[in-house]
Image (cartoon, helix red, strand yellow):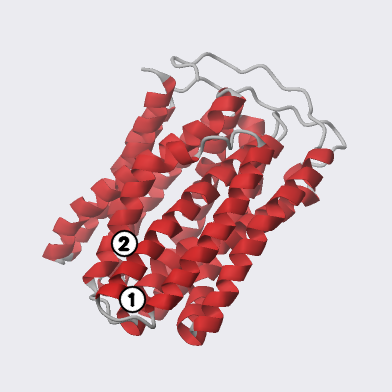
Amino acid sequence: MPPLRLLSLISLVNTTGNGLWMVSSALYLTRFAGLSIAQTGLALTATGLVCMVASAPMGYVADRLGAREVYVAGLLAQALGTAAFALVHSVWVYLLIGAPLAIADAAQRAARGAVIGGAVPPEERVRTRAYLRSVTNVGIAIGSALAGVALAMDTRAAYVVLILGDALTYLVAAALASRLAPIPRQVHTPGAPRLVALRDRPFLVFVLLDGLLSTHFGLFEVGLPLWIAHRTDAPEWLVAAVYLTNTTAVVLLQVRAARGTDEPRGAARAARRAGLTLLVACGLYALSGHAHHAVTIALLMAGALVHVVGELWHSASGWGISFGLSPSDKHGQYQGAYAIGMQLGQMLAPIVVTTLALGWGDPGWLLLAVAFALAGAAMPPTVEWALKNRPHETQTEEPHGSGRVSI
């Protein structure tokens, strides 16, 4: 099987399972697992924080032990941990399972980035990530649709089936990932710092800026539905329409939007465009709060279309910069550090966007818009700074064994 097809199949299987859990997790935890709404929010935040803290260290582990091996191990650990969610009956049991599961998630994500960074030619890495993101949206859509059947039944047994189905997809993904060719393991130089990515100041500034831009995901997933329902006269079915618009655009256009972002400077320019585009989207959303009926719908749909263009450019820019600034022998820890920005943005986004957009109204939208534009504008000088201060690379160790698929 060609390598990109194999990676795509892994993503499709894995994200179909993710879709099963994403749609059903909150309802399962609050209705059948003994957690209150407040405990669910706290538990999800806590496990998200664990995943964020573990990202760079797990990337370092992937570099040292082998990206493919850590990728497979992370998927297997997630299969076990996900299945254990069927046993949750309190917030403490959830945390006991969820914290190690978050570490496994951090490991497989960083290792996946290292697999791509270590084996795919530099000029193809961003395109590969773009293609896989399109596949991811297809998988989540399939999983969400399947989960709808269980949601309609609304029984504990139905939710447990979803949990075990998600666990099964991790097992299948691990089996497929074991067919990938091994990536050379990295040798640590005695006396040299281990987590170089967390000492690379220009890269960390990029991560922070990317995290700020990443809050637009929370704006779309949390802020916009609440805005439509409580601050406009648009029908609530429009929430589904904008979600469908976003998902369809990502599936169809992500690869095209990634053109020109396969090197850091081009990717930084895409980030600048993303910031300006998100500024326009915020303006359209704000205007929808002052319009009526058909004009409201038109403004919201226009905002969603502009927003997804910014999302496509932002995603592509992050891949191009993170791969472009990563030393060839440290893709695992650099991809893990890059994930910190996204995770931080997603953790902060719900409270930030609801406070600003819904709480402050027009001034809040203006502040969000300016923040996006400034973060995007800061990317090109940050990348120039980083390119002038790239860390040295160390020697690598030959891979052990042989794989059946080379990528």
Q: Residues within 10 Å of mark 2 (few under 14, many from 20)?
A: many
Which residue is the extreme one toward the front? 295
Relative to 206, 402 lies left or right? left
Q: Quadrant of residue 32?
A: bottom left
Residue type, mark 1 in image: Ile
Residue type, mark 2 in image: Val
Q: Are marks 1 and 2 in contact (CB under 8 Å)?
A: yes
Q: Is residue 329 above or below residue 197?
A: above
Expressed as whole percent of the image width and height from the top left, the position of residue 176 reads 37, 28
Residue 21 visible in the snapshot: no
Expressed as whole percent of the image width and height from the top left, the position of residue 326 reads 69, 37
**Is residue 213 or residue 47 the one in the foreground?**
213
Relative to 66, 404 lies left or right? left
Residue under pointer 2? 242
- Which labelled disc corresponds to residue 228? 1
The mark that comes first in sequence, 1 or 2, is 1
Q: Is residue 402 above or below residue 128?
A: above
